[in-house]
Image (tube, grey):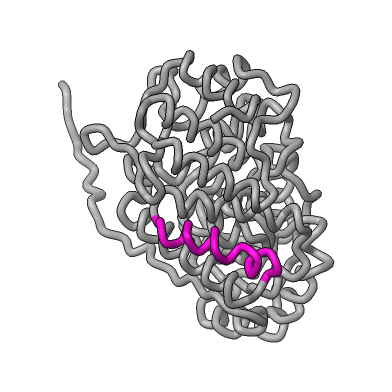
Amino acid sequence: MEQKIRVHLSKMVDYSYDIVIGTSLFSRIAKEQEKNLTGGGVAVITDSLVAPLYGTKLVAALEEWHKRVHLLTFPSGEKSKNRRVKGLLEDRLLRRGLGRDATIMALGGGVVGDLAGFVAATYHRGVPYIQIPTTLLAQVDSSVGGKTAIDVPFGKNLLGAFHQPACVYIDLDTLDTLPTKEFLAGLAEVVKYAVILDRKLFDFLEEGMGRILSREKEALSHLVARSCRLKAWVVKADEREENLRKILNFGHTIGHAIETCGRYGWRHGEAVAAGMVVEGLIACGMGYLDLHSFRRIRKLLENIGLPVCPPEGVEVEEVIRITCLDKKARQGRPQYVLPCGIGEMKSIAGLYGVSVEEDVIRTAWGEAKNGEK
């Protein structure tokens, strides 16, 4: 006899958290988190570049308040963001006896945040974690919003989970040691926010680039805070990327494919910059974006010192194939989020994902390669 039993799980959960932006925050992190961290131990996960710069400093600050602090490192770079390294980190946590009452701190750039966050999402079915981003890209983008992921041979960020951090601490002092190319790559994400949501931010970037490139703290504080506010607004409206949150992927559909095809020879921000140019040209080709606005976007990226054309050796046909595996793809067809002006994105019937014919992509790719328009 057939029976049906309903499991009632409807509930409201508050996953709100604070983003703290300032300087000299490590001692504050340790003190503020004293009441939140239980006796289960703290694992600081970082990479081989950040560990000697800030890992031991953070551990020393934490040890003033907590007895069980562990520093776990892995080789720096996108190539470590994979199943194997994730498993190694989890095994090390288990060997050290950390349980469900442990807390993970992700100290580093986007790779560290994505990887440590995914470990936190799955370790003992989920433990709390804190984001402490040390690169501009992570501070303005990847540390906020709860997206965690690893890469697989089929593409970038195809395995992951939504797992919101308990808190985000952004110490602007860590940008002092950030290599120039990494700093410029982080600015690509700020340009993205300006294009998709904030014309005034775009104007600020155009007018204040000298202050920004000299890493003036006041200018950086403004960029980081504004980017975080914009992302927080989008995440609040659409945590799981059902619609609005897709706009945060401007430049990323092509950018992720460039990274995958180029075996991560380019930094994420560099690939996104080239991706914004190609996708901007797609928007022009479809009649959404005017040529003057596109040229402003490309010129700003050029002035920063970011790539505005795809890398040599990456073929458009392979890029098209990779985009069909993109997380936004539906029925094997990629969906693009495209600007219709600076500070505004194209929506059709209230939906932001736009299907694009392959010939339009090929034309835009060729125009970007040749520096046309």
Image spot of residue 343 (x, y percent): 38, 51
* Whether residue 87 can be seen here: no
* Whether residue 266 can be seen here: yes
Specify the quadrant of the image occupied by residue 265. Answer: top right
Q: Is residue 345 left or right of residue 46?
A: left
Q: Residue at x 69, y 49 (%)?
A: 305
Quadrant occupied by the N terminus: top left
Say if 138 sits above or below 220 in the image.
above
Query: 146 or 359, which is in the foreground?
Result: 359
Quadrant occupied by the C terminus: top right
Is the magenta region chiefly helix, strand or loop? helix
Query: 178 or 102, which is in the foreground?
Result: 178
Query: 328 or 281, which is in the foreground?
Result: 281
Say if 322 sits above or below 219 in the image.
above
Say if 84 sits above or below 210 in the image.
above
Q: Is residue 245 left or right of residue 29?
A: left
Q: Give, as a single range, the part of the protein colored magenta.
A: 198-215
Image spot of residue 85 (x, y percent): 73, 43
